[in-house]
Amino acid sequence: MKIYFLVLFLLQIVMPLFAQDFDEDKKGYIPLAKGLEYDIEMQSTFSEGRTPLWLNANKYGLSSLDNTNGYLRAGVFRPLRTDSARRWGMGYGLDVAVPYNFTSDFVVQQAFVEGRWLHGVMTVGSKEYPMELKNNLLSSGSQTLGINARPIPQVRIALPEYWTLPFAKGWLHLKGHIAYGRMTDDRWQHEFTDRKNKYADDVLFHSKAGYLKIGNEDVFCPFSLELGLEMAATFGGTAYRPDGKGGMTVLKGDTGLGAYWNAFVPGGYDTGETTYQNVEGNHVGSWLIRMNWDTDMWRFSVYADKYFEDHSAMFQLDYDGYGQGEEWDEKKKSRYVLYDFKDIMLGMELNIKYDRWINDVVFEYIYSKYQSGPIYHDHTNTISDHIGGRDNFYNHSIYTGWQHWGQVIGNPLYRSPIYNEDGTIMVKDNRFMAFHLGIDGRPFPRFMYRVLASWQEGLGTYDEPYENKRNNFSLLFEGEYAFGGKLLNGWKVKGGYGMDLGAILGDNYGFQVTVSKCGLLNF
């Protein structure tokens, strides 16, 4: 219950700041059965080998690697926009799937209730949240808060849309969120590892993000700048690690109020750490920047996503001025290590605002081979040098890394643990360079397509490097048609062909077909 009290306290602080004009006449009782939307979907995938990457990835974890798989899915939602004219609103949703050849026999993909007061929103439950500052259809994915894994049940307070700050004459806009939740993949971990490799139960989750936009759409200024910081952590729970003697070492994480604070402001230390203490839990994050040039006909953007797992990668700087002998653990000098600025995602996006053969083009470059360098050395009483390399992106010494149900929570070009055949929950290819291209268009009424193509050169990890560089090429062709008319309104059919070629994911070829129907429930 401590998590709920903390969130409610924060809610009381921040909600009064969000006041702007709303329709004063829209008060009182909200008809909760009004504005209901439904969505029914059936999907089947047939592959030679595993399901190709872009038929499997960035689907909020509702996917499978089995060569034949699919699901029947149904959802009912009351979106908050139903009460957009009111000072406060209510929304909820239930979205379930009955799959075959998945990691689960029944999936509750989304189940949430949410309330809005003015511009602030509080959500309780599992909900699919889109990526920020990236194209959700064409990007390879965010490095921290992506759309590749199943939603995590959480309590979340947010400014989901940019709110114009009242003191900057319309030039500054803010949005963001704070959330606490709990991972739900304990059973999957038990089955995947057979409880012989590292796993963790009852793990808690925290994320927070803030985005600042500089620009003013009310004056003639096509340029805008968006800055963001995303941070997240897993903590608490009980971790199990092989002890090398056929048994398991049990590490019980803290779940008190102090642990929640150490997740919010990184601090403390993990169970078992003595002389060399890091922060408590597994912390990850990204610095984000996006620059936009927006005209009546087109919009062009360039952006960057700088991922980090500790302070050495977060600030590219580490303290290295410890003494020697009896003063080996004391800070004696003003000396620092400056790390190379190599690991980063760089992207650009062109959007044509009127339907044509090509509407959007996204190109991205991702590099993660450096990870603060190949050397890690804690200072000692004889060697004072302190170098914090070998960051091991998406992995952690105690927890199962930045993953949920076997899929990485960030960018799926980091090879997800679900691909592993040895029962280990770890990302085995986190040092790579990749180029990614995404294109979509609407050449005909009611028809749209998209193409995704990614080339990747992987080195494995620092601890388990590949003997030779491994390459991979992944491709997707996908088309969707939306029917019209009274009888078929709301029906869509989508077909996609994907392939993987190379040594990272193997050679895979597959076809996927999706039929869906959406509409309003009028009670």
Image: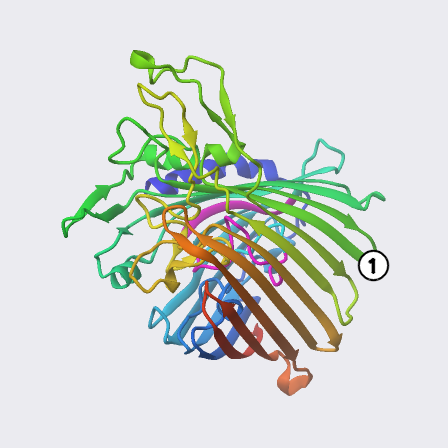
Q: Quadrant of residue 151?
A: bottom left
Q: Which residue is mark 1?
A: 297
Question: Who is closer to the viewer here, 458 or 26?
Answer: 458
Residue 415 screen position, x and y as percent: 44, 58
Q: Identify the amino acid type marked 1.
A: Met
Q: Residue furthest bottom?
A: 487
Left or right of 189: which side holds 502?
right
**Residue at image point 65% right, 54% down:** 85
Q: Residue at x 35, y 62 (%)?
A: 420
- Looking at this view, is 5 or 501 the one in front? 501
Residue 502 at what x, y percent from top left? 49, 67
Q: Tell me: residue 48, above or below residue 297.
A: below
Up/down of 473 relative to 272, above or below: below
Q: Residue at x 63, y 45 (%)?
A: 304
User: Which residue range is magenta in the image?
Assistant: 135-162
Q: Using the image as rendered, state which of residue 521 and residue 293 is in the foreground.
A: 293
Element type where label 1 sits in the image: loop
- Residue furthest out toward the right: 220
Question: Which quadrant of the structure image shows residue 260?
Answer: top left
Q: How is the image coloured?
A: rainbow
Q: How many numbered markers are drawn?
A: 1
Query: Crowding at label 1, few (<14), some or many (≥20) Cα neighbours within 10 Å?
Result: few
On the rendered structure, is 165 left or right of 418?
right
Q: Position of residue 471 (x, y in %)?
A: 51, 61
Question: Farthest front residue?
Answer: 468
